[in-house]
Structures are given as C-alpha cells and as structure tokens.
Amino acid sequence: MMRHKYILTPLLVVLLLTATNINAQNQGPAFRQISPFDSAGNPRTGESLDRLTTARSLVAQGALISAAAMLEDLYAQTPQDRSVIDLLLTCYVELKAYPKAEVLLTRQLEVFPTDVLYHGRLLDVYMKMGADSLVTVHAERTLARFPGDMGIYQAVITALKGQGYQKMGMALVDRAREEFKDPRLFALLAGSFYETKREYARAVREYQTAYGLDSLTSVEADRRMAALIRYPDSPDEVIGALKNILAKSPHDLFALKFLSEAYIRQNKYAEAFESVVRLDSVQGNQGRELFNYLRRCHERKLYEQVIMVAEYIRRQNSRTVPAFNYNFFEAEAYRGLGRFPEATAIFDRIITESPRTRDKAEAVLEIARIHHYDLKDYAGGRRLYDSAMGYGYSGVILQARLEKARLFMVEGQLDSAKLTFELLQGDKILQDSQEQIAFNLAMIELYRKNYVEADLRFRKLIAEYPRGVYLNDALINSLLIRESAEMYPAVLSDYADALCFQVRLMPDSSVARLKTVTDKGESPLVGTALYHLASLYVDLHDTTAALGVIDRADKDYPDDYFRPYCLKLKGDILSGNPVHREEAGEIYKSLLENYASYPFVGEVRERLQQITAGQSSVPNL
C-alpha cells in the first residue's frame, strides 16, 4: 500500500492556522509591520499609510468600532489591499459582525477563487456563526476547488475538529481514506474524534495505526495514548482494544507497552507484569522494559511488585540490566516494607560484589540511613556515615555530612547541627541542597525560640528560592511567627517544642505539645497544630484519632487555612478503605473545586482519577 507523506506547504500552514483560529488570525494583523506598498505593488500615499497605521493602533488598543469605520473607508478606496482586509476582518470577527465578514470574504473569493487564506477564514466565520449548512457547503466548495489535494483535506478536517464539528470531520476522514485509497490516512485526527465521542477502543486502534507511520507521528501517538489511559472512564475499553490487537498480532510493541501501563492504572499488577515480560521477550530479552517497570513500581511505592520483578530479573540472569541498579531498588523496597534485615543484606551484597566505588559508598550510606531513621541506632548511623565518607566519593561525602547534621537535630544537639549546616552552606557541589540547608537553619532557630532570627531566615529563603520546594512551609512559618510571637508567646513556645520533638522522632511528646496548643483555644496556631496532630496519628496508625482531630478542625475552624489540608488527609485515609472510597472521592472533588490554588492539587487530582476509574468526570481546574 502506498504511504503518503504529509508535508505542510506555506499555503497549508496558513489555512491550518486561520481555520483553527490560532492567534495569528485575530491578533496578527494588528501587530504586523505595514508594507509601504499595497497588494498591487503600488506605493502607499502618505495619508493612506497614516490612516492604516492609526487603524492598526486602534485595533491593538481594542477600539474596534472606530478602527472598523476607518478601515471601511480605506477598503472602499483600495478594495484589494490585503493589509486593510486583514485588519477589517479582525475587527468584524472580534465584534462578532459575522455577516459583514462573510460578505467581505465572499467578495474576495470572487476575485481570488483559489486563495487558500480566504477559504480558510470564511470557513472559520461560518463555524463561529454556528451556520452548519454553510459550514458544510463551504467545506465541500473548498475541497472541490483543490481536487486531489490531501493537504487541503487535512486543513479542513483540522479546522472542523478545532471548532467541535466532530461528525462532519470524521465523515471527511472516511471520505479521504476512500478517495486516496489509504485506510491509515489521518489516523491521529480520527483517534481524537473517537476520543471526543468516548469510543476509546476505536481511538486506540487509530493511534496504533499512527504509531507505525513515521517517527514524528509515532511520538504524537505515544503521547496521546499515554493521556488516554489516564481518562477515568477509559481503562476497561482501552484494555479490551489492546488485547484484541494482541490476539491478532501477539508481538505488537504498541499494544504490549500500553497494556502494562493500563493494568497498572487499574492496580492489576499481575497482569501488568505479564505484559511487561511479553514485551521484554518480543524485544529480545533486553531487560530494559523490565527495569523500567520496576522503576515505575518503585516510584508508586509498590514495594512487593519491585521485589517480585527484581527476583525475576535475577532468575533470568539478565546481563543487559546492571545488577546493582535494580538491587538498589529492591533493597529500598524491603526497607519500605519494614524488612530491614533483608534490605541490609542486599546493600551488603552490593558493597561486597559491585566493582564500582560509587555503588559501595551509596550502599553504606543507605545502611546508615536505616540505622538513623528506622532502627533509631544513632551511634551506628553516625559510624556508618563516617564509613561511607571513607570511600572518597564526593557526592556521598556531602550527603553523609547532611545526614550527620540531621542526626544532630534528632539527638537534640541543635548547636552542633547548626554548625554543621553552616559549614555546608555555599558548597557548590551541594548546590541543589542549599535551599534545604537554609530551611533547616531557619527551623533550628524556631526550635530554639529565636523567633526574630527564624523569621529573618524564612523570609530570606522566600526571596532566594521563590519557586523552591520549601517555599510554602517558609511562608507559613514566617506568618505564624509574626502573628503569634507577641500575642501568643506561650502557645508559640509549645508549638515550637512540638515541631522539635517531631524532628527528633519523638511522636508521643510531639502529640502532647500539639494537644496543649489546641486546648489553649483561639490562636493563629490552632489550625496548623490540628493538622500536625492528625498527621502524627496517621503515622502512629491511629486513624480513628486522626479522623476525630480532622472532624474537629472541619467543624470548629471552617475558615482556617489548614482546614483543606485536614480534609485532604481525611480523603487519603478513607481512600485506603474500599468501603469509603466514594466518600474520599467526594472530598477530593470538593478540594479541587474550592481550593485550586493549594499546593496539593496535583496529588489530589491523581488520587481522584484512581478512585473514579469507570466514572464520568473529574474537575479539571
């Protein structure tokens, strides 16, 4: 079968841009430099040039009625001057004077019947008018004017798609395929039409077709499929379509790749893993897809899946997957499951067997973190940090020094922690960690109740890292200090103690101090204290107590800044219970609709999409 190359000629680009109403149509003429010659090549007179310049300035300022009146006079004098026509059409379209735009374009087409630009703009005017019969007539007229031109077909179909004429656009796709005897023609456009109609299986088949056409089309088909499988109501139909493709073509790379991702979206990990194994086999057992799947599972904290895949790779003895790369993920998965001896054993194996110094140093660093954060063996952690630095690998040395500074904080040695962090400030190798260091130094001053110094450090961090990871926390802490230091010093003191106990991994003491803050009544610190208290109860696996605190925040402090954070935490708790997932979904929807500016919006939307798989809509704010 003949394969067509779709090359956008300059004329076709013009039609695509104008017919789909991209900014070049409505705003371009107002800012385009005016030629000193008119369309016929005659030099403009000083008066006409001045009036055209004035009209363009009026369009740019939004004075469209005045501009239109001036341009109509100019058009009467030079009816073929395209600069005048462009600006006048812009005025008519912006003023929604579509009949006038229609008359103007019709006149031009009588003189220039093969002008692609005017055909495209007239089609756009008819679509804006909602005149379906005229849209149909002019689309047919345009195609008839340029018979056998595949590019014109594409431009007209794209224009119809952009304005919501899905049925007509798909009909033209079918007609073009028959006319050019190519069933694969305009596969991306067809897929988008089927997506709009929620015919996801047909969309999948079109994207699979597009995936095999050429490299650029394949990239776009890949992108659209990745988005399609995230639609809440698409997974079942998408999976069915991909399985049908594989039934006919068992080695189809496109179907195998997206089938595994679709299964992951439905939490069907056994099926997802089976698809990845098949994909790896089709690719010659390279192991690349297995490792990618393991990495994706690690990112989602699917630790049991990580361990299963790592064991499979080991059984396969895949030499194409660097052993110590997946071993790190495997060890971190065991740690995530609380199985610290198994995690340590894998890290020990890396230290013994890996030929790379970096691997050995990083493995020791991870064992040190297990002792530090999980086993609360601070002496062992400090010794292992020193051991990791002994390998001489600069990246690990700096990370170990950061961890030792944090360890001083855990042990309550705030002066030593401050000194260590200050020694790390300005280190070029630790450039990515400088914001974190600055935040910790500010928090140390808060723990020590040096509120003025803490506030200054938070405000400096805000100025230096306006898009940083710690920006929101710095803003909140600075505001709380300024609102509470003078009016509620005792409450602020209890709150600072609570945060200090939290960083020292002493949750019971932190809970006691937070309760003191909340029990003292109205203060700017109550909302944040309730949120921290609920979060600590979740960490202590006491969801009943956490929900009680959240309900108190919801009932007694409806206007507090931290109430949405509490509600989000409630949604997270309920979403883990199948019985309450629907209630969690309603909480997430409410948060998206009412608190779209909060930092957690992205996470909330993702969680809602997981919950509403098979339902119809997710707020898109």
Image (cartoon, rainbow, N blue to C red):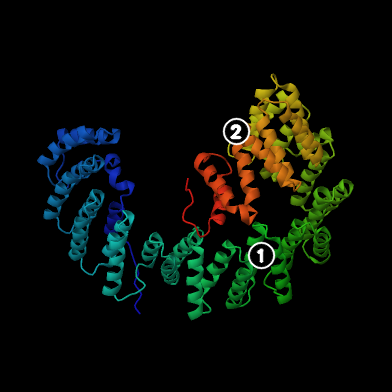
Which amino acid type is shown beneath numbered disc 1?
Leu
Residue 390 visible here: yes
The structure residue drawn at horizontal position 70% and vertical position 33%, both measured from the top left corner, is 529
Task: Tell which residue pokes out farthest to the top in this image.
Answer: 486
The structure residue drawn at horizontal position 79% and vertical position 34%, both measured from the top left corner, is 512
The structure residue drawn at horizontal position 48% and vertical position 60%, both measured from the top left corner, is 233
Q: Dot 1 surroundings within 10 Å: few (below 14), some, or many (20 or more)?
A: many
Q: Dot 2 surroundings within 10 Å: few (below 14), some, or many (20 or more)?
A: some
Camera-side residue: 320 or 223?
Answer: 223
Whether residue 573 sits left or right of residue 43 in the image: it is right
Q: Which mark is residue 561?
A: 2
| Vertical position of residue 602 compared to residue 287: above or below | above
Quadrant assignment, res 66: top left
Which amino acid type is shown beneath numbered disc 2?
Tyr
Task: Tell which residue pokes out farthest to the front in this image.
Answer: 579
Which quadrant would the N terminus be assigned to in this image? bottom left
Relative image position of residue 65 (x, y in whole percent): 21, 34
Rounded to the nearest angstrom, the CA distance separating label 2 from label 1 is 39 Å
Sequence-earlier tag: 2 or 1? 1
Name the secondary structure under disc 2: loop
| Vertical position of residue 178 compared to residue 34: above or below | below
Q: Are marks 2 and 1 in contact (CB under 8 Å)?
A: no
Whether residue 321 sits left or right of residue 600 in the image: it is right
Whether residue 400 sits left or right of residue 531 in the image: it is right
| Vertical position of residue 588 compared to residue 416: above or below | below
Relative image position of residue 328 (x, y in whole percent): 74, 61
Relative image position of residue 5 (x, y in whole percent): 35, 69
Residue tagged by mark 1? 294
The structure residue drawn at horizontal position 78% and vertical position 45%, both measured from the top left corner, is 403
Which numbered mark, 2 or 1, is in the foreground of this view? 2
Q: Which mark is residue 469?
A: none
Relative image position of residue 479 (x, y in whole percent): 63, 27
